[in-house]
Image (cartoon, rainbow, N blue to C red):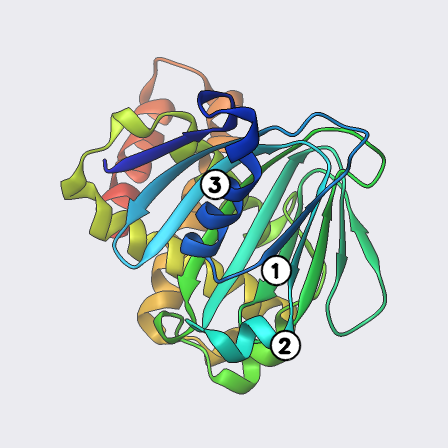
Amino acid sequence: MIEDVFKSEDLPLTDRVDAWREKLSQIHAPVDLVCRPDFDFHAQQRVVHLGDALVWPSVWSPQTIRRTPQLIRRSDPEVIHLSLITRGAVGFRMDGPDAVYSPYELRTNDSSRPFEILMGPHGKVVDAVSVDVPRARLPLSSDDLDQVIGHRMAGQEGVGALLAAFLTTLTGSPRSYTAADAPRLETILVDLLAAVFAHTLGAMDRLPAESRRRTLTLRIRAFIQANLRPALGRPGPAARALDDADATCHLLRR
């Protein structure tokens, strides 16, 4: 799997903030970066390339990221961003009131709209797994995406939990995959993103039938693993039948 790594400590102190700003601007869109003077700056990131989509786990010291109207006029790649916070808190301001996101909540923004993100508003380090994907890659209308981006979404239940599990599994063992796996993994990621957005809108029927089928397959597989396998154990005919069902779901997913 193609993977890029950034560690601020690998750079001279005077270059770290500018290098991190440039890295964020390359991944999502040009941004301004403001660091708190009372904290040592630290940033770490791994970027996994899945076709048009990027998945990147990261660690942040307290800092503020801004995308201003001036920056949007300068360059807008029309990219949708989603972050799964896994440690710490993240403040966010876009169109609505200020919000603070906690671990295993899903936060989104859009490169076409101004926003401000405060990493670690309480002075704590933040860990997150983020996704950037072109808006045109998602099988939802532009109006649907405009309605849902910026809404708070849960990563601990339903389709949100499936997306969270996919992201943490993928980034937890990227060497388990090869470049040949990237197209299939990108398809799963886009399906799950679209399903999370459609679920938030209460509009699952707006997804293409193929996306709904693949997402349902993943939900069946997750239910089997979470509820049936621990109760049945191994060995025995019931457990073997469960393995067959699980294998079928795996084949359907492919």
Q: Position of residue 214 (x, y in %)?
A: 34, 58
Left or right of 179 on screen, residue 75: right
Q: Quadrant of the N terminus?
A: top left
Please say whether residue 203 is visible from this viewpoint: no
Type of amino acid under label 2: Pro
Q: Which residue is mark 3?
A: 19
Residue nearest the observer in this picture, 108 or 191: 108
Which comes before the other along the chain, label 3 or label 1?
A: 3
Left or right of 146 on screen, residue 253: left
What is the spatial separation of the Cα atoms under label 2 and label 3, in whole angstroms? 22 Å
Q: Position of residue 38 (x, y in %)?
A: 82, 29
Left or right of 172 on screen, residue 64: right
**Residue at the (43%, 75%) spot, across then down:** 207
Q: Which residue is mark 2?
A: 69
Q: Looking at the image, is mark 3 or mark 1 nearer the viewer?
A: 3
Residue nearest the observer in this picture, 169 or 39: 39
Secondary structure state at the residue bearing disc 1: strand
